[in-house]
Amino acid sequence: MTVLARFRQRLLPLGLMVGMILPMSSAMAQQAFPPAGTLTTQGHGEVKVRPDSLSVTVTVQSQTPTLAEARAETNHRMQAIIAALKGLNLSGMKLETQGVQVFPVQGEPAKNKLPKVIGYQATNSLNVSVIGASTDSLGESGSRIVDTALNAGATNVGSLNFFVNDMAAPRAKALELAVKDAKANAQAMAKAADIALNGIYNLEGNPQFGGYAPRPMFAFSRAKAADAAESTPIETGESTVTGDVTVRFKF
C-alpha cells in the first residue's frame, strides 16, 4: 500500500465523523436562529376541571412484646377496617394493600452493650379509592371513609387526594385553546406588520395539571376522632389544566 493510500485510509474515519457532526450542528443552529420569513409566538389555554375520583391511605400500627402478637393485632384490626369500609357500599370503591412492615423496637443501650429488643412494631397500610363518582358526592364519600376507618380501629388516615380518572379530554382541550390563542396572536402581529401568514413552520406544546388540594389538608388520627362530635368535613374544590404552545408561522 502506497503512502498516499495509507494517508487516505486514515482520513476516512475523520470524514465520517465530520459528516455526522455537521447535520447536527446545522439543526441546532436552525433552532437557535429561526429562518427568515417566519413569525414566532406563544399561546395559552386553560380548562377548569372538577374531580371524579379520590384516594386515601388508611394505616394500622401496633406495638407488642412479641412478633407474633404484633402481626396478629395489626391483621385483626385491618380486617375489621376492611369489613367496615365494604359495608359502606360505595359505588366504584376499591381497596388495595399498600404496604406491610414489621420491625423490632430497641431499648436504650447499656454501656458497652448492644441495645436489646423490647418489642415489635407492625404497620399495615391500605389504599382506599373511589373511581368515577360525581364531584358533589366525593366530599361526603371521603368523610364517610375517614370516619368509618378511624372508628373501626385505624391509627392514621392521610394522603387524601382528589383527581380526574381520565385526563385525556381536558389536556387535549387545553392544547386546542392554546393553539387557537397562538394563532390569534400571530394574526394580530401579521396584520400590524402588513404580512400574510402562510402555514405553520414549527409547533411545540405541553399540557400541565395543577392538581387538587383538599381544603383543608388532613392528617387524621384516632385521638382527633375521639374528640370530634361530628363527621369530618371535606371539600373537593376544582383545579386547572393549562396548555402552553410555541408556534412558528411562515409568511
Image (cartoon, rainbow, N blue to C red):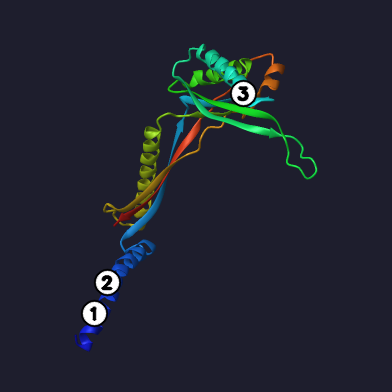
Q: Nearer the viewer, residue 199 or 98?
A: 98
The nearer-to-camera label among 3 and 2 is: 3
Marks 3 and 2 close (CB-CB < 8 Å): no
Residue 144 visible in the current orientation: no
Q: Earlier in the sequence, mark 1 or mark 2?
A: 1
Residue 9 - label: 1
- Where residue 234 appears, as percent x and y from the top left, is 59, 22
Residue 210 - label: none
Residue bearing the label numbered 3: 68
In what element is the residue under mark 2?
Answer: helix
Q: Could you tell me the amino acid type at mark 2?
A: Leu
In what element is the residue under mark 1?
Answer: helix
Q: Could you tell me the amino acid type at mark 3?
A: Ala
Q: Nearer the viewer, residue 144 or 238?
A: 144
Classify residue 107 as left or right of residue 8: right
Q: Residues within 10 Å of mark 3 (few under 14, many from 20)?
A: few
Q: Could you tell me the amino acid type at mark 1?
A: Gln
- Where residue 239 appears, as percent x and y from the top left, is 50, 33
- Where residue 12 appears, as percent x and y from the top left, is 25, 76
What distance separates the C-alpha of mark 1 from that of mark 3? 75 Å
Q: Nearer the viewer, residue 15 or 208?
A: 15
Q: Nearer the viewer, residue 50 or 250?
A: 50
Residue 9 visible in the current orientation: yes
Residue 80 found in image quarter: top right
Residue 16 - label: 2
